[in-house]
Amino acid sequence: MSWCFQCGIQYSMGVDDCVECGVALVDEAPVDAADVGASGEDQMAYELHEWAGESRRILDQLLTAAGTAHAWQGATLVVRVADEEAVDLAVAEAADAGGPALDPEAEKLAYEMDGWAADEQSAFSELLGRLGIPHEFDAEGDLLVLVADEESVESALDAFQAGADDRPELEGLGANRLLSDMFVACDRLRKDARDLTGIEQLIGLVQVLVEHRPPFGIDGQLWNALGERTSELVALLGIGDADESEVSGLAGGLTDVLRNLT
């Protein structure tokens, strides 16, 4: 088995990345933040939402290898205050390993990130990392890049914003009902691949899912992955001689993910 170190979802063998967080899975089961340190022991948090997912994974592996107690709450790292010095060293090492660093002597350009959600900052940071563009976020939350890379950053920004989701947003309560109804339908199909009620419900629900962008608080990558996997299941259900074990397996996988969202 493998786990997502950030959200704690457990996956069967053969899955490489977390559907919810989009990060590579690890072999060690994560712990709850309440279990970091002894009862009543002081804790501290590192807000790392601006880091790329790979950098957070590297940090998680460094802390695990060193036996440093830690837990993740999304992109926030929770550790013991007593381990601050060791964690700072691991943070610095992971930051260096996660991508090219800015030249401290080179002229820099700042991009204000006001209005950007944490997941958008993280996604854009990952895009710059894949392009090999050095960058970091300053104390005010602004994105710093080299002046020499301005043209490349502008091109990346244009591409990133061009891919923005222009579907209508599904508001929070509507999204909660949708995900709950999807969970019920998938759970029925997990138990019985020929359950007509589950089939009819899922066919109607998948249209709502794919035609709307996610509400605030739900990662867009996860939302789109749910749409793709649910559409795959619906397409399979449309085949007259669909393999029942395959239907139940897909429905079961969706049920596991939806359980953590509802």
Image (cartoon, rainbow, N blue to C red):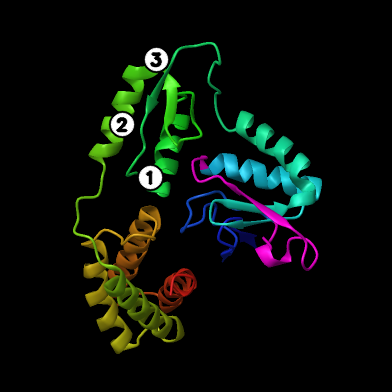
Q: Which of disc 1 and disc 3 is earlier in sequence?
A: 1
From what the image shows, is residue 89 above or below residue 200?
A: above
Q: Position of residue 174 (x, y in %)?
A: 27, 73
- The quarter of the image holding the N terminus is bottom right
**Residue for badge 1:** 120
**Which structural element holds mark 1?**
helix
The magenta stretch spans which residues?
28-52
**Residue for badge 3:** 147
Q: Which of disc 2 and disc 1 is earlier in sequence?
A: 1
**Residue for badge 2:** 157
> Quick check: can you spot residue 162?
yes
Q: Residue at coordinates 43% horizontally, 82% vertically from top-left? A: 187
- 137 left or right of 80 in image: left
Residue 7 in which image quadrant: bottom right
From what the image shows, is residue 28 above or below residue 185?
A: above
Residue 236 in which image quadrant: bottom left
Find the distance from the CA under tag 1 to the CA under tag 2: 11 Å
- 144 left or right of 158 in image: right
Name the residue type under label 1: Glu
Q: Residue at coordinates 35% horizontally, 82% vertically from top-left? A: 185
**Which structural element holds mark 3?**
helix
Q: Are marks 1 and 2 in contact (CB under 8 Å)?
A: no
Q: Residue at coordinates 67% horizontally, 60% vertically from top-left? A: 30
Name the residue type under label 3: Val
Find the distance from the CA under tag 3 to the CA under tag 1: 22 Å
Residue 241 is inside the magenta segment: no
Q: Position of residue 184 (x, y in %)?
A: 38, 83
Please state the total of marks drawn on the protein image: 3
46 or 229: which is nearer to us?
A: 46
